Image (cartoon, rainbow, N blue to C red):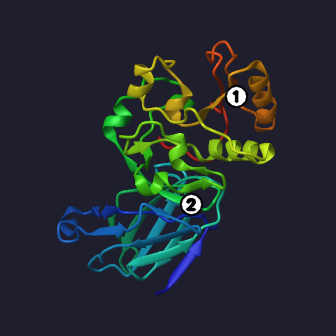
């Protein structure tokens, strides 16, 4: 297999999704509809392993990567291969990445292209496949603020992904309280902040609440624009003023954008979120 990498490397492995190629010219596209699959929900070691079916007349395939689900207009990395598979190690910071495959003939004519797939990368090198979930997206409130846009892509939640370490001391499932969810948002940078605080603490840290679906958030009386729904908020048990003050101090170096007062938190937890943090990735 010949493979050429460009624009720097990112760090992921994706899973169990299918690409459906759509030709730009309808006459050729009808006979060149193909699929590709990536086989695991989670992966490690910063690898992305992709396979796709051959497109008739194609002499090369270009795999573009973006940090937003708009690969056509915002690619940050790409690779070229003559084969119908690609294994690529990527060394990027934590975040979301999206992939799309383009098939070209020898004259450089685009014959076909795929839909997007996405993956979330966490600080351990764990990569979790992302997916769209239109029902979940539609359940989000509408807001004009850029950091309150409705998510379009979510991490895949199953027994495997929830049991996987997104940080040295935390599994993905510790940030998911709804047992029936199959999709959710668990922001990689938020996880990194929590792990940094846990490292300073030097002992176990429990998470009361992480991601909440909009329906669950409404059912428990959460704020209408609670950051728990965007996956960058978390609550930690705190039942005394001393506990609350301790976590204020412990997390101060992580720069949370909002901390609930102890009274607002019901005198039973410490809440912090990173609603305004600048990220180089999006899920909308």
Q: Is residue 9 above or below residue 128?
A: below
Query: Residue at 36% across / 63% down in the picture?
Result: 16
30 or 218: which is nearer to us? Answer: 218
Say how many tags the image has.
2
Query: Residue at 38% across / 35% down in the picture?
Result: 137
Residue 231 visible in the snapshot: yes
Q: Is residue 80 left or right of residue 6?
A: left
243 or 52: which is nearer to us? Answer: 243
Q: Earlier in the sequence, mark 1 or mark 2?
A: 2
- Disc sitting over residue 281 in the figure: none
Helix, strand or loop at mark 1:
loop
The location of residue 223, given as percent across then percent down, is: 51, 18
- Disc sitting over residue 257 in the figure: 1
The location of residue 194, given as percent across then percent down, is: 68, 42
Query: Residue at 48% across / 23% down in the picture?
Result: 143
Depth-wise, is mark 1 or mark 2 nearer the camera? 2
Residue 279 visible in the snapshot: no
Residue neighbourhood size for the residue with mark 2, other residues' Cα within 10 Å, grouped as few (<14), some (14–19), many (≥20): many
Helix, strand or loop at mark 2:
loop
What residue is shown with label 2? 126
The location of residue 205, given as percent across then percent down, is: 67, 41
Per the model, the C-alpha gap separating discs 1 and 2 is 26 Å
């Amino acid at each position: 297999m010949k493979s050429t990498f460009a624009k720097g490397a990112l760090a992921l492995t994706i899973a169990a999704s299918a690409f459906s190629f759509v030709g730009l010219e309808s006459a050729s596209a009808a006979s060149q509809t193909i699929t590709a699959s990536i086989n695991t929900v989670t992966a490690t070691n910063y690898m992305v392993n992709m396979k796709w079916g051959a497109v008739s007349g194609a002499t090369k395939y270009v795999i573009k990567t973006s940090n937003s689900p708009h690969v056509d207009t915002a690619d940050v990395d790409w690779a070229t291969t003559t084969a119908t598979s690609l294994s690529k190690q990527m060394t990027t910071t934590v975040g979301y990445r999206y992939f799309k495959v383009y098939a070209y003939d020898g004259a450089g004519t685009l014959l076909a292209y795929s839909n997007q797939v996405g993956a979330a990368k966490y600080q351990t090198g764990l990569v979790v496949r992302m997916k769209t979930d239109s029902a979940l997206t539609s359940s989000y409130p509408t807001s004009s603020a850029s950091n309150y846009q409705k998510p379009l892509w979510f991490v895949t939640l199953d027994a495997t992904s929830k049991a996987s370490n997104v940080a040295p001391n935390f599994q993905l499932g510790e940030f998911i309280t709804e047992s029936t969810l199959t999709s959710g948002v668990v922001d990689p940078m938020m996880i990194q902040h929590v792990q940094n605080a846990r490292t300073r603490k030097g002992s176990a840290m429990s998470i009361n609440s992480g991601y909440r679906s909009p329906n669950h958030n409404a059912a428990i009386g959460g704020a209408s624009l609670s950051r728990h729904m965007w996956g960058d908020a978390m609550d930690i048990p705190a039942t005394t003023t001393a506990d609350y003050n301790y976590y204020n101090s412990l997390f101060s170096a992580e720069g949370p954008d909002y901390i609930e007062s102890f009274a607002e938190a019901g005198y039973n937890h410490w809440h912090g979120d990173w609603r305004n943090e600048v990220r180089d990735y999006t899920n909308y």
